[in-house]
Amino acid sequence: MKYLIIGLGNKGEEYTETRHNIGFKVAEKIAETIEASFKSANFGWLADGKYKGRRVLILKPDTYMNLSGKAIKFWVQKENIPLENIMVITDDLALPFGTLRMKMKGSDAGHNGLKSIQEELQTQNYPRLRFGISADFSEGRQVDYVLGKWNDEEKEKLPERIEKFSKACLSFVFAGIQNTMSAFNGK
């Protein structure tokens, strides 16, 4: 069994600690947990490891958010991974900070990374894990907010939330999506 976990984000030091890069942070925690190291690869950085006998590839695309689909399509095809064995980790404005929501499929909800993935894979039917970043911004300030840095209260809670999301992804690999959604959604 082979799995591909993709953490969405933007390359570059200026984006490292931004809300939009939470997918990278969770991907890094998963790699650390399974003792896999990221190496430069086609369309990003790839870590290759094992979890409970299953091969787990973890991808941080370097395509920028709005072209994430190209990286995912490349690795899905190269490694011959069925779409039900991928997990896309992304930020979500519609959820309160730190809320975990795993789904088997769904719309892009206006998220440029998910829009790109949907266009490249030609389907909305792929698992995703959404990390709530809330929508605490004034009208017309959405871009500044998602590309902004975490506030002090969020920074304090981030390590625990990143740990929880990492565990949810590894549960997906071992226990499947239905069991994982039951155990983790909303927690």
Image: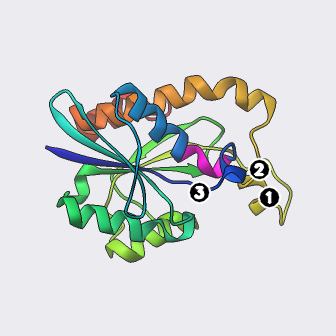
Q: Is residue 183 left or right of residue 108?
A: left
Magenta-drawn stretch, dominant element (helix, strand or loop) = helix
Residue 25, by quadrant, is top right
Q: Amino acid at mark 3?
A: Lys
* Residue at the far right in the pictured view: 138
Q: CA distance from mark 1 to mark 2?
A: 6 Å
Question: Measuring 59% from the left and 57% from the top, which residue is drawn there?
Answer: 10
Q: Is residue 108 magenta?
A: no
Q: CA distance from mark 3 to mark 1?
A: 17 Å
In the rendered structure, which segment of residues is drawn in magenta? 19-23
Indicate the position of residue 83 as horizontal and vertical percent values.
Answer: 25, 59
Local secondary structure at mark 2: loop
Quadrant of the rendered structure where residue 158 is? top right
Instruction: Name the residue carrying label 2.
Output: 148
Q: Which residue is mark 3?
A: 11
On the picture, is 64 further left or further right than 152?
A: left
The answer to whether marks 1 and 2 mark residues whose Cβ atoms lie closer than 8 Å is yes
Instruction: Write down the residue under mark 1.
Output: 144
| In front: label 2 or label 3 | 3
Q: Amino acid at mark 1?
A: Asp
User: Between marks 2 and 3, how big is the CA–CA gap?
Assistant: 15 Å
- Residue 95 position in % (x across, y down): 61, 45
- Mark 2, other Cα within 10 Å: few <14 / some 14–19 / many ≥20: some
Point 48% across, 64% down: residue: 114
Of callouts 2 and 3, which one flags the residue occurring earlier in the amino acid sequence? 3
> x and y percent of residue 82 in the render?
19, 58
Q: Secondary structure at mark 3?
A: loop
Q: Amino acid at mark 2?
A: Gly
